[in-house]
């Protein structure tokens, strides 16, 4: 039997990538990596999530962190998931303005596709309070979706899907820090991302990598 392709991905983003709040320790990244291996993909998933980071922070660091992790793989891919901290209001201003957020994503995707890494982008989930995004978060998700569509890159939206989902808000209340979800919330995120194109994207790494 032919060995499964050696697939390596890096997931760069914020605390929701890191899985803050998941007492099981895996977050959505760990859950999808485990399910991918269970289904026969030989996947190594590197979690590059950092708490409180914006798109600007990720843009500054992700490439240097990804390069050594991608060497010698049969298929390579990048997942980007940020935006929650961009729309957070501090001292009366967003941490990153709308146009700058979109420009950061565009520049990140330029670099990633230039390196021939197949990309997937995940939108930011909703969190409580107008100071944490409100309608700005919806507008940013729409802009990210358009940026990805123009490049033929899979984008998984979360804002509209989860805003009216009582289980999502219950998972945030259960963890108790006013922002992050518990293990049930991360299981929900993993399910949405899986349904949003994860499997086709993952298989494309071996085909095009």
Image (tube, rainbow, N blue to C red):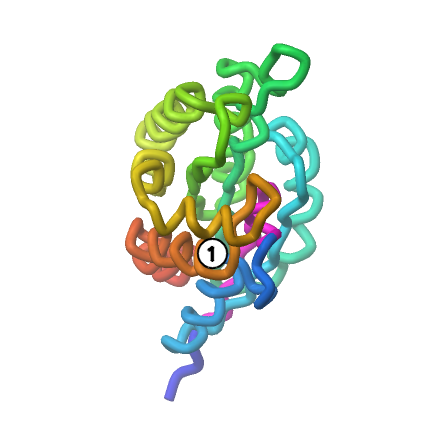
Q: Is residue 87 left or right of residue 156?
A: right
Residue at the location (42% across, 37% down)?
A: 123
Question: What's the magenta region?
Answer: 5-20
- In the rendered image, the quadrant that contains the N terminus is bottom left
Q: Is residue 31 left or right of residue 167?
A: right
Residue 95 location, quadrant? top right
Q: Is residue 173 above or below residue 84?
A: below
Q: Is residue 137 above or below residue 189?
A: above
Residue at the location (59% across, 19% down)?
A: 89
Mark 1 is surrounded, within 10 Å at the Cα level, by few (under 14), some (14 to 19) or many (20 or more) other residues, namely many
Q: Is residue 38 above or below residue 67?
A: below
Q: Is residue 13 above or below residue 3?
A: above
The answer to whether one can see residue 155 in this image is: no
- In the rendered image, the quadrant that contains the C terminus is bottom left
Q: Is residue 29 left or right of residue 166?
A: right
Residue 202 location, quadrant? bottom left
Disc 1 designates what residue? 186
SS at mark 1 in the image: helix
Q: Nearer the viewer, residue 66 or 199?
A: 199
Residue at the location (42% across, 44% down)?
A: 169
Residue 20 location in percent, x, y? 61, 52
- Extreme-top residue of the structure: 92
Residue 18 location in percent, x, y? 61, 52
Residue 204 location in percent, x, y? 35, 56
Q: Nearer the viewer, residue 55 or 76?
A: 55
Residue at the location (42% across, 69% down)?
A: 36
Q: Nearer the viewer, residue 176 or 195?
A: 176
Tally of numbered tags: 1
Residue 175 location in percent, x, y? 56, 52
């Amino acid at each position: 039997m032919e060995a499964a392709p050696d697939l390596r991905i890096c997931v760069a983003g914020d605390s929701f990538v890191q899985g803050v709040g998941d007492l099981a320790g895996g977050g959505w990244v760990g859950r999808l990596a485990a399910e991918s291996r269970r289904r026969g993909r030989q996947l190594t998933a590197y979690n590059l999530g950092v708490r409180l980071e914006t798109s600007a922070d990720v843009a500054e660091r992700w490439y240097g962190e990804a390069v050594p992790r991608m060497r010698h793989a049969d298929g390579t891919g990048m997942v980007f998931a940020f935006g929650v901290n961009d729309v957070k209001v501090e001292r009366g201003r967003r941490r990153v303005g709308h146009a700058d957020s979109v420009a950061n994503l565009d520049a990140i995707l330029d670099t990633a596709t230039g390196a021939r890494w197949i990309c997937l982008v995940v939108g930011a989930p909703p969190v409580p309070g107008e100071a944490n995004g409100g309608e700005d978060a919806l507008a940013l998700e729409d802009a990210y979706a358009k940026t990805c569509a123009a490049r033929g890159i899979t984008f998984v939206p979360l804002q509209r899907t989860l805003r009216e989902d009582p289980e999502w808000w219950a998972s945030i209340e259960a963890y108790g820090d006013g922002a992050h979800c518990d293990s049930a919330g991360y299981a929900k995120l993993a399910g949405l991302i899986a349904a949003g194109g994860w499997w086709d994207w993952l298989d494309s790494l071996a085909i095009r990598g």
